[in-house]
Amino acid sequence: MSRYIFTLALIFIASFPAFADNYCHDREAAEQWKSLVEKEPNDLALQRLHSLRLGICLKIEQGNLTLEQGITIFELERLKLIQKLAKEELEKEKKFIQ
């Protein structure tokens, strides 16, 4: 499986849908993220989302962001990353076909 497909799968698995219930305090989710970034330490897309998650959670805890703002920020960035990776994979496939 290509790195991009793997990363896309991880991004879908590690999204923030449960964040509305304060995903920042979800120990299972934190362990899932920890496991993912340990398994893929060189996957910058995954590392980027994990870093964003940590920063958003910190800002929510400090009262600098609302939960809803955190969800919006994370989801927008996650979707941008998915689009970027899908575009890169498509370009790679086009080169392979030619």
Image (cartoon, rainbow, N blue to C red):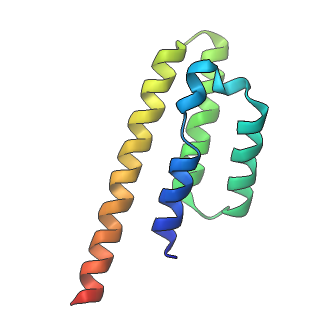
Asked which quadrant contains residue 92, the reply is bottom left
Task: Say which residue appears at 56% left-offset and 37% top-offset.
Answer: 52
Lateral position of residue 62 relative to residue 44, left or right: right
Q: Position of residue 58 (x, y in %)?
A: 65, 23
Lateral position of residue 85 relative to residue 29, left or right: left
Task: Say which residue appears at 44% left-offset and 34% top-offset.
Answer: 75
12 vs 43, nearest the viewer:
12
Q: Position of residue 10 (x, y in %)?
A: 56, 55
Q: Name above or below for residue 5 compared with residue 83.
A: below
Q: Position of residue 5 (x, y in %)?
A: 47, 66
Asked which quadrant contains residue 97, the reply is bottom left
Q: Name above or below for residue 34 compared with residue 25.
A: below
Residue farthest toward the top in the current orientation of the protein: 63
Task: Say which residue appears at 44% left-offset and 42% top-offset.
Answer: 78
Quarter holding the C terminus is bottom left
Total labels: the figure holds 0
Lateral position of residue 44 relative to residue 41, left or right: left
Q: Position of residue 79 (x, y in %)?
A: 38, 43
Residue farthest toward the left in the current orientation of the protein: 98
Q: Name above or below for residue 73 compared with residue 79.
A: above
Q: Name above or below for residue 25 compared with residue 90.
A: above
Task: Say which residue appears at 62% left-offset and 65% top-offset.
Answer: 42
46 vs 13, nearest the viewer:
13
